[in-house]
Image (spheres, rainbow, N blue to C red):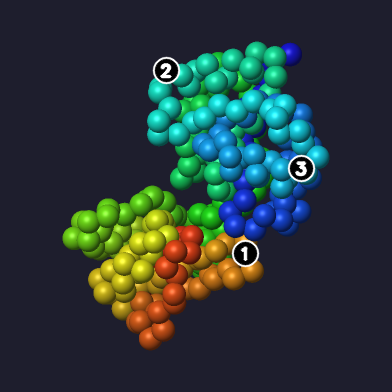
């Protein structure tokens, strides 16, 4: 019987599996011995937290990251001829702001059933809690590292947000959060709404939406904290 490709979410921050994963995830992971992962060491830790009884050394791991050669990827799904495979994200859900879409594309081409499992997604959680438009939104990934280019893109996305009534979401490496926030506050219009979501699923979680002019009165310390940013400039009707 042909196996399936399960897309298995992992922790965002909290490592309490009972808080963020349904029992079905554990039930399925117990049946899988082949995994495609970005980093084997962190995946081993995740699986041990999810299922303390699991025998890690009995499992097989294939690495999928920026060093993986394209010609190797197709072979990763060979076990699906007889067994199911798990694709595990480093944080949150696979294939959304995360590697894995190539594997899923090949699975569809080979008629392998793809099964996404429920788990935390920082992008969707931010959108849910932001109060911004959840009917029309765009995730834009990372903004440019060079400041002039970054400011140009901030202004571009703010204009798009206004013209298309569209929430704009993006991320940054945690150690550059302060610079990004500074550029947003200094270059967006004062009535644009900005949501900052930090440390999702952790006790110190911060999710707050304010106008740019309100953020300027009290700037939060988000340096080195995993964060998602979302903003929207509304048309006045």
Q: Position of residue 37 (x, y in %)?
A: 56, 34
Q: CA distance from mark 1 to mark 2?
A: 39 Å
Within-10-Å neighbours for mark 3: few <14, some 14–19, many 20+: some
Q: Position of residue 4 (x, y in %)?
A: 66, 24
Mark 1 — residue? 202
Query: For residue 151, what is the image quadrant?
Result: bottom left
Going from N to C along the chain, the mark reached first, 2 or 3, is 3
Mark 3 — residue? 51
Within-10-Å neighbours for mark 1: few <14, some 14–19, many 20+: few
Taking the spot 64% from the left edge, 25% from the top edge, the residue there is 60
Query: For residue 158, what is the image quadrant?
Result: bottom left
Which residue occupies the extreme bottom position in the image? 217
For discs 1 and 3, the disc positioned in front in the rendered view: 3
Looking at the rendering, in which quadrant would you find the C terminus?
bottom left
Q: Is residue 167 above or below residue 101?
A: below
Taking the spot 64% from the left edge, 69% from the top edge, the residue there is 203
Taking the spot 58% from the left edge, 68% from the top edge, the residue there is 205
Looking at the rendering, in which quadrant would you find the N terminus?
top right
Seen from the viewer's position, the closer of residues 233 and 92 is 92
Q: Position of residue 224 (x, y in %)?
A: 44, 64
Would you say residue 230 is visible in this rendering?
A: no
Q: Say which mark, if any, is on residue 71.
A: 2
Q: Secondary structure at mark 3?
A: loop
């Amino acid at each position: 019987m042909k196996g399936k490709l399960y897309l298995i979410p992992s922790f965002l921050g909290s490592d309490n599996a009972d808080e963020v994963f349904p029992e079905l995830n554990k039930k399925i992971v117990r049946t899988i011995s082949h995994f495609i992962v970005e980093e084997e060491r962190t995946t081993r830790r995740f699986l041990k937290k999810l299922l303390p009884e699991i025998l890690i050394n009995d499992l097989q791991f294939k690495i999928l990251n920026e060093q993986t050669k394209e010609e190797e990827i197709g072979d990763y799904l060979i076990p699906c001829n007889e067994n199911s495979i798990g694709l595990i994200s480093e944080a949150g859900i696979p294939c959304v702001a995360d590697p894995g879409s190539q594997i899923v594309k090949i699975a569809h081409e080979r008629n392998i059933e793809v099964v996404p499992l429920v788990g935390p997604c920082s992008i969707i959680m931010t959108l849910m809690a932001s109060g911004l438009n959840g009917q029309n939104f765009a995730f834009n990934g990372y903004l440019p590292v060079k400041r002039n280019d970054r400011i140009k893109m901030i202004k571009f996305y703010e204009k798009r947000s206004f013209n298309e009534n569209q929430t704009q979401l993006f991320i940054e490496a945690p150690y550059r959060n302060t610079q990004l926030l500074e550029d947003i506050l200094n270059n967006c219009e004062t009535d644009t709404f900005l949501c900052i979501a930090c440390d999702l699923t952790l006790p110190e979680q911060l999710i707050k939406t304010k106008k740019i002019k309100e953020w300027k009165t009290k700037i939060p310390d988000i340096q080195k904290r995993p964060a998602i940013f979302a903003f929207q400039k509304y048309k006045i009707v």
